[in-house]
């Protein structure tokens, strides 16, 4: 099976081009949201892998308005993609972790920008109140909306180890509420978490695929400076992937993901100045090309084993 862009898996880029008729670029924004894993509600310091920037290393400057951030970043992107349209992406922190008045204030600034095609919001399954659910449903009636939920693993013992602060049951409850409202959900999974073997990683992917989210993001565990993961790595408690090992795992995962699910990401790229390992991940297009070549070698594609 061949998807858009001559790929053997259902890429976000191909999906958005087909839906909107042009290149769509996500503009990463920082609205200054905190996280219950940082402010003491559930913990401090965040998950063991989370950077001091609360996963917003590539997002805008929270000291600037949403419009200022969007204009600066989209202007740079427009130099690369002349005819692209844009989608504001609230990436840094937990972007529903605030009173509904704050959410409306922030999201409406983004929604007021001319010629955007939708909005994407990254959050946690334990941080979407009933009021927020109703508001997200309202937004989904006005424009394309994607809500990204950090799950990382379906195994609660892994969740405890990484200090996730939520259970798989809580994730399932939130996921069901979003799907009941026909809101597009993207689920984040991380390969290489401490204590997990290949079978556990595949089981997380298989379980999430069976739930039929709109999309999935596959990440690898990055070892970043000033995180607990860095301490564990230097103590020999975490082993990172070799590139070929990771490429083969991702191909195995793609083969069991339902063919209709959009694959938003198959790798990640930690900030150069904070990345400790794996250093090969900086060249993310080498990883993407490696996956393309391996699927071609196998004569395989997304969902072949689903």
Image (cartoon, helix red, strand yellow):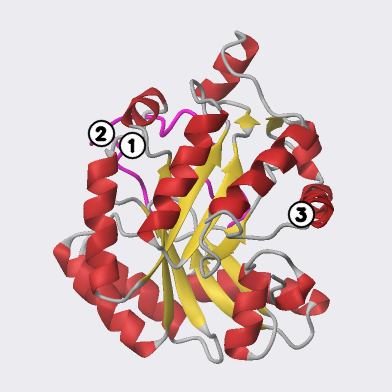
Quarter of the rendering occupied by the N terminus: bottom right
What is the span of residues highlighted in magenta in the rendered image?
33-59
Q: Tell whether 155 sits left or right of 205.
A: left
Q: What element carries label 1?
A: loop
Q: Which of marks 2 and 3 is in front?
A: 3
Q: Report the predominant secondary structure element of the magenta stretch.
A: loop
Is 50 one of the magenta-colored residues? Answer: yes
Q: Is residue 1 above or below residue 254?
A: below
Which of marks 3 and 1 precedes in the sequence? 1
Does residue 222 appear anywhere in the picture?
A: yes
Q: Are marks 2 and 3 in contact (CB under 8 Å)?
A: no
Q: Are marks 1 and 2 in contact (CB under 8 Å)?
A: yes
Which of marks 3 and 2 precedes in the sequence? 2
Residue wearing tag 3: 295
Q: Tell whether 274 sits left or right of 93.
A: right
Residue wearing tag 2: 42
Does residue 149 appear anywhere in the picture?
A: no
Q: What element carries label 2?
A: loop
Percent of width and height locating residue 100: 22, 67
Percent of width and height locating residue 191: 57, 37
Marks 1 and 2 sit apart, C-alpha to C-alpha, by 5 Å
Picture disc at residue 37: 1
């Amino acid at each position: 099976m061949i998807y858009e862009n001559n790929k053997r898996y259902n890429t976000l880029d191909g999906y958005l081009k087909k839906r909107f008729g042009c290149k769509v670029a996500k503009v990463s924004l920082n609205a200054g949201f905190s996280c219950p894993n940082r402010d003491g509600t559930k913990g401090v310091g965040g998950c063991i892998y989370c950077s001091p920037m609360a996963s917003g290393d590539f997002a805008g400057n929270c000291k600037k308005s949403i419009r200022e951030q969007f204009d600066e970043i989209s202007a740079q992107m427009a130099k690369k993609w002349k005819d692209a349209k844009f989608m504001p992406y609230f990436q840094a922190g937990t972007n529903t972790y605030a009173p509904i008045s704050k959410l409306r204030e922030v999201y409406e600034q983004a929604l007021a920008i001319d010629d955007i095609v939708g909005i994407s919001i990254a959050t946690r399954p334990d941080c979407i109140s009933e009021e927020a659910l109703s508001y997200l449903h309202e937004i989904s009636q006005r424009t394309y909306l994607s809500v990204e939920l950090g799950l990382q693993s379906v195994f609660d013992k892994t969740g405890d180890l990484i200090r996730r602060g939520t259970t798989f049951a809580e994730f399932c409850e939130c996921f069901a509420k979003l799907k009941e409202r026909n809101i597009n959900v993207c689920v984040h999974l991380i390969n290489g978490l401490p204590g997990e073997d290949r079978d556990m990683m595949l089981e997380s992917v298989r379980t999430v695929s069976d739930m039929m989210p709109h999309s999935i993001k596959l990440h690898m565990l990055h070892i970043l400076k000033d995180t607990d993961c860095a301490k564990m790595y230097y103590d020999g408690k975490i082993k990172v992937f070799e590139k070929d090992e990771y490429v083969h795992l991702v191909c195995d995962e793609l083969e069991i993901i339902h063919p209709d699910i959009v694959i938003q990401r198959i790798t990640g790229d930690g900030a150069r100045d904070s990345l400790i390992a794996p250093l090969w991940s900086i060249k993310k297009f080498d990883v993407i090309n490696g996956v393309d070549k391996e699927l071609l070698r196998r004569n395989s594609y997304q969902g072949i084993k689903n």
